[in-house]
Image (tube, helix red, strand yellow):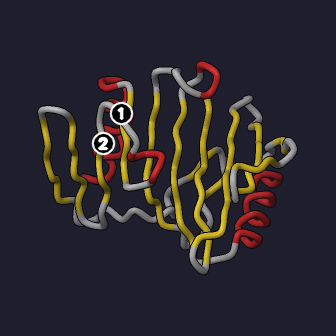
C-alpha cells in the first residue's frame, strides 16, 4: 500500500515542482528543483527548504514492476533513478520520464530483449543511434509515444536509460 502511494505521488511531485528526480543517476542528479534518493527500504526527499526520509519496507527499486506499453525493464535490472520533467523544456517541448537502470548482463542481451519486446508489443522501430558508448533504440508506440532505450557497457554488465517522451 505504501509503495502504491509513493508511486502515485511521483506525478504529483512532477506537477508541483515541474521536475522530480529519484536516484543517483548522473543525469538525474544534475540541477533541478527537487530530488529524491531511492534505497531498498526508504525514500529520501531533498527539496530546497525541506528534507525527509520515509521508511518503505516493501519498496524495492528493481525493474520487475516497470511496464511501458507492454515493454518491461530487462529481467533482473535495478532502477538507478527516475527523472520526470513535466515542463516541456526538453525533448522538443515534450514532457519526459527517464528511468535509469543497471544490469549484470551484456548490452547485446539487453538489446535483443528490448527489440523483441518492442516488436511483440506493436512498436515501430526507427534506426538505432549512438550516444557516446550507448546504442539507442528509437521506438514509437501504437499511440505515437516516442520511447528511447539507451544501452551501454558498464563494469561487467550494462547500464542505460529508458526514456518516454509524451
Camera-nearest residue between 160 and 3: 160
- Graded by Cα atoms within 10 Å as few (under 14), some (14 to 19) or many (20 or more), the crowding at tag 1 reads some
In the rendered view, would you say 150 is above or below 16?
A: below
Q: Quadrant of residue 38?
A: bottom left
Q: Residue at x 74, y 38 (%)?
A: 141
Q: Which residue is mark 1?
A: 32
Task: Say left or right for 146 vs 76.
Answer: right
**Residue receiving disc 2:** 35
In what element is the residue under mark 2? strand
Tally the numbered discs.
Answer: 2
The answer to whether 5 is drawn above or below residue 132 in the figure is above
Residue 61 percent across, percent down from the top left: 40, 62
Which corner quadrant holds the C terminus?
Answer: top right
Q: Of circles 1 and 2, which is in front?
A: 1
Q: Where residue 81 sits in the image (x, y, percent)?
A: 43, 53
Between the residue at mark 1 and the residue at mark 2, the CA separation in whole angstroms equals 7 Å
Amino acid at each position: 500500500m505504501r509503495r502504491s502511494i509513493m508511486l502515485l505521488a511521483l506525478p504529483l511531485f512532477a506537477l508541483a515542482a515541474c521536475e522530480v528526480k529519484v536516484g543517483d543517476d548522473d543525469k538525474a542528479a544534475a540541477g533541478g528543483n527537487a530530488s529524491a534518493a531511492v534505497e531498498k527500504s526508504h525514500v529520501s526527499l531533498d527539496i530546497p527548504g525541506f528534507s525527509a526520509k520515509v521508511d518503505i519496507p516493501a519498496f524495492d527499486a528493481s525493474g520487475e514492476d516497470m511496464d511501458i506499453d507492454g515493454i518491461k525493464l530487462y529481467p533482473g535490472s535495478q532502477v538507478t533513478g527516475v527523472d520526470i520533467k513535466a515542463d516541456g523544456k526538453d525533448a522538443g517541448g515534450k514532457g519526459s520520464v527517464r528511468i535509469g537502470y543497471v544490469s549484470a548482463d551484456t548490452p547485446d542481451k539487453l538489446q535483443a530483449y528490448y527489440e523483441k519486446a518492442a516488436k511483440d508489443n506493436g512498436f515501430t522501430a526507427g534506426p538505432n543511434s549512438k550516444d557516446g558508448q550507448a546504442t539507442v533504440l528509437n521506438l514509437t508506440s501504437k499511440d505515437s509515444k516516442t520511447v528511447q532505450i539507451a544501452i551501454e557497457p558498464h563494469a561487467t554488465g550494462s547500464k542505460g536509460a529508458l526514456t518516454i517522451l509524451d
